[in-house]
Amino acid sequence: MRLAPFLIYILGIFVATAVTSYPVFLGLEYLGLRDMPFDQMVTRLLKLYGLLGLWPLLSSFHLNTRVGWGYGRGRGSRGFFKGLFLGAGIGVASMALIVLVLLVFDIRVARPGVVLSPAAVTVLVLQSAFAGLMVGLIEETWFRGALQSSVSLVGNSAFAIVFLSFLYGAIHFVSSDIRIPADEVGWLSGTAVLFTSLHGFRDPAFFDSLFALVAGGILLGLIRLRTGRIAECIGIHAGWVMVVKILRQTTYPNSDASWSFMIGDYDGVIGILAGLWFSSLAIAYYVRYGRRASVG
């Protein structure tokens, strides 16, 4: 049954997190690293196990190859990096259009006291670019790389893209609504946190941001399907994150703006406007390329 490895993967992530949360917490406490609240540690541990579980998952599907991970398709490193930089340019440009609308309509306004000297701008851009690259590399390897390869075998490419786009969107809202004091953490505390870990996903206030994340995920999934690799996906994702981080550092949401509903509560940037824009790009990309997908 092709579905079995994927179900084992999902179940294994939650079981491993529930069982090891308390020992990991004690280990961090012993090392003097108890600054992170227990609930945050559990959700980060969940994501860590999700990444670590990709290797056995791909192996079970006989996909533990460069192509399976999304790094294949025989053009070599030069072609991959070319796609990466091309994607980064597309990501920055596409998100910059959203930023332009937000600024023109005063949906986000400049933070008072922000100094944009050449040195400060350089540091901000470099820090944001590095953060964007790390996020893009990890999340695209995870979702558009390993998981899209695996889930495509369980169903088909269309199912994989849509399902993983919703999963990708939902994981951004994984956070517990309970706070367990450090001196009350025990063996069942990890399980308690996991049971409430999707409360953010259930909050209707985040649905506009979820819409944007799902739409962006579908666009990236279509690009992965056509190109047979994740180079462009990593670049686009990195460009998006980079621009958002710069915008959040230099501006803040203006709740008095007439069009303030166009941004979401998740990060004050992505919302209805971004969702509509990403959806338009995904539709245009599909119409342009249709089913012309790479076979790896």
Image: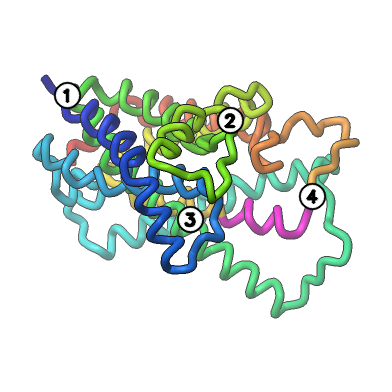
Write down the quadrant of residue 104 in the picture.
top right
The crowd level at tag 3 (other Cα within 10 Å; few <14, some 14-19, many 20+) is many
Residue range in magenta is 242-251
Q: Which mark is residue 4?
A: 1
Q: Which of marks 1 and 3 is in front?
A: 1
Left or right of 21 on screen, residue 153: left
Residue at (38, 60) in percent of width and height = 27
Q: Are marks 1 and 2 in contact (CB under 8 Å)?
A: no
The span from disc 2 to disc 4 (Cα, nearest Å) is 22 Å
Name the kind of residue labelled 3 in the image: Ala
Q: Decide which of 53, 86 is in the foreground and name it.
A: 53
Q: Mark 3 points at which residue?
A: 88
Q: Which of marks 3 and 4 is nearer the N terminus?
A: 3
Given the image, on which type of amino acid does mark 1 rest?
Ala
From this viewpoint, is residue 60 visible? yes
Q: Nearer the viewer, mark 2 or mark 4?
A: 2
Q: Mark 2 points at which residue?
A: 200
Secondary structure state at the residue bearing disc 1: helix
> In the image, residue 153 lies at what x, y percent?
18, 27
Label the magenta part by its dominant secondary structure.
Answer: helix
Say which element carries label 2.
Answer: helix
Is residue 93 found left or right of 191 in the rendered image? right
Residue occupying the far bottom of the picture:
119
Query: Is residue 33 located in the magenta-colored stretch of the structure?
Result: no
Q: In this view, does 127 lie above or below 264?
A: below
Seen at 82% across and 31% down, the residue is 259
Q: How far apart are marks 2 and 3 (CA)?
A: 30 Å
> Type of residue at label 2?
Gly
Q: Where is residue 97 in the image (x, y as percent from the top left)?
A: 66, 45
Q: Which quadrant does the N terminus fall into?
A: top left
Which residue is under mark 4?
252
